[in-house]
Amino acid sequence: MSDSIRLKWLLSESDIRAGMKAETLPLLSVSISWGVRRREATDTTTRAAAEDLSNYKICRAGDLVINRMRAFQGALGIAPEDGIVSPDYAVLGVGPRIDTRWLKYFLTSRSTVATMASLVRGIGGTEAGNVRTPRLNIADLLSMTAPVVSPEEQSVIADYLDRETARIDTLIEEQQQLIDMLRERRFALRASVALHGTAQAEEVESPLPWAKKLPAHWRVVPLTSVAELESGHTPSRSREDWWQDCYIPWVSLHDVGMMRGAKYLHDTAQRISDAGIANSSARLLPARTVVLSRDATVGRTAIMGVPMATSQHFAAWVCGPDLDPEYLWVLFEDAMQPFFDSFQNGSTIRTIGMGDLKAFRIPLPPLDEQRRIVECLDEETSKIDMLVEEVARFIELSKERRSALITAAVTGHIDLREAA
């Protein structure tokens, strides 16, 4: 495989296909390493009436489709059917003596992906002033070289990789299903222990819509009777002096991602100044205050690790002596999630208003039982999390094995006669 040939002799950028109308074709998308997938539940007639498809590209089954923004991550595939792709994709026809499967494997091999990454153009501004995402120029792609491989050998390589990558992909899918099962088990365990305790006890019907039964000796109380409800504010951005010398952690929507699955929030993406707090309704809240996102990602929650202020997008509870903040966090994080989901209607998410927040009611076990619940969940959750991490590591190793196998096969480092 020492001889090489430029990809422009193997590939050609496809033109609009005569006799094919974008309005009548399914919309295709390319995912990393998994080829082209059709978006489900797409009514092409309705979609065409609502979207401008003039810049979309038409492809035929068998064309090579490359995501120009993610080509350096191996985001390319073979179109399984006639369809259309967005302007961010390139549609390439493949020469008659080329096995498209072999070419796809070659373009997803480590060395080729690294070369494509080096060809990605830098960020620049568009005429509208928007930021342009770095993308691969197709002319640069076509200037790359590929090894000269006979059509027969291409098919042998492609057949071998189809078999072996299918085995690895099946294993990865099974392990991913195991992770999903473990995460479901984790959620169910946490919600169950939060609402039933760590020891068997007599139970009664619950007055709460998100809990069927509760231990008979637990109380159900308004949350405001055992914790002080607080909200936040954003000082005027037009007053630059209010945003200078900022050192006070300020919980905003920028922190929602960090709160995912995290019990404590010790720092924030943005900070606020003393002047900012003094000239707004925001207030410095003590450590161990429990915060809850009221909109955007409704229900995302954490405990303040240090004193912080919040924006108006969050509610906060300063717990009294009868409520352990970590138990309240468990209720918010797990048991009450179905309740928070009710604030989302389809794709529309409404804010949890102050009236709703003041009406929150929670189960209240005795304080020592609250702490036993928290300790039990910390211990049991850590076991499941360790299993998830182990499976995730196995998946990453399998992906590395898949990538190494492809690279070795297309570069001739595997004797496929012996492998067969």
Image (spheres, grey):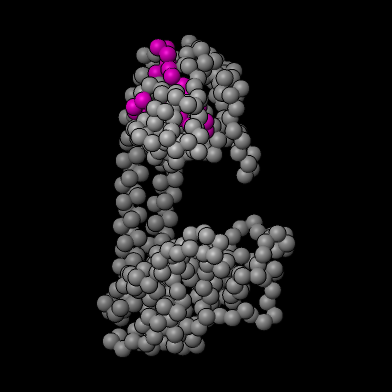
At horizontal 34% and vertical 39% (from top left) the residue drawn is 385
At horizontal 40% and vertical 46% (from top left) the residue drawn is 179
Inspect this view and state whether residue 190 appears.
Answer: no
Give coordinates of residue 113: x percent, y percent. Answer: 36, 70
User: Which quadrant is home to the C terminus?
Assistant: bottom left
Give coordinates of residue 99: x percent, y percent. Answer: 45, 82
317 inside magenta stretch: yes
Left or right: residue 203 versus residue 108 is right
Left or right: residue 289 versus residue 336 is left
At horizontal 40% and vertical 12% (from top left) the residue drawn is 321
User: Which quadrant is home to the N terminus?
Assistant: bottom left
Q: Is residue 235 above or below residue 121?
A: above
65 inside magenta stretch: no
Q: 243 and 350: which one is in front?
A: 243
Q: 384 and 257: which one is in front?
A: 257
Q: Which residues are magenta?
A: 302-324
Number of disc labels: 0
Give coordinates of residue 37: x percent, y percent. Answer: 54, 63
Inspect this view and state whether residue 172 appears.
Answer: yes
Give coordinates of residue 373: x percent, y percent. Answer: 38, 22
At horizontal 55% and vertical 35% (from top left) the residue drawn is 295
Left or right: residue 53 versus residue 334 is right
Quarter of the image where one finds residue 353: top right
Q: 179 and 243: which one is in front?
A: 243
Q: Is residue 84 above or below residue 189?
A: below
Q: Is residue 260 above or below residue 45?
A: above
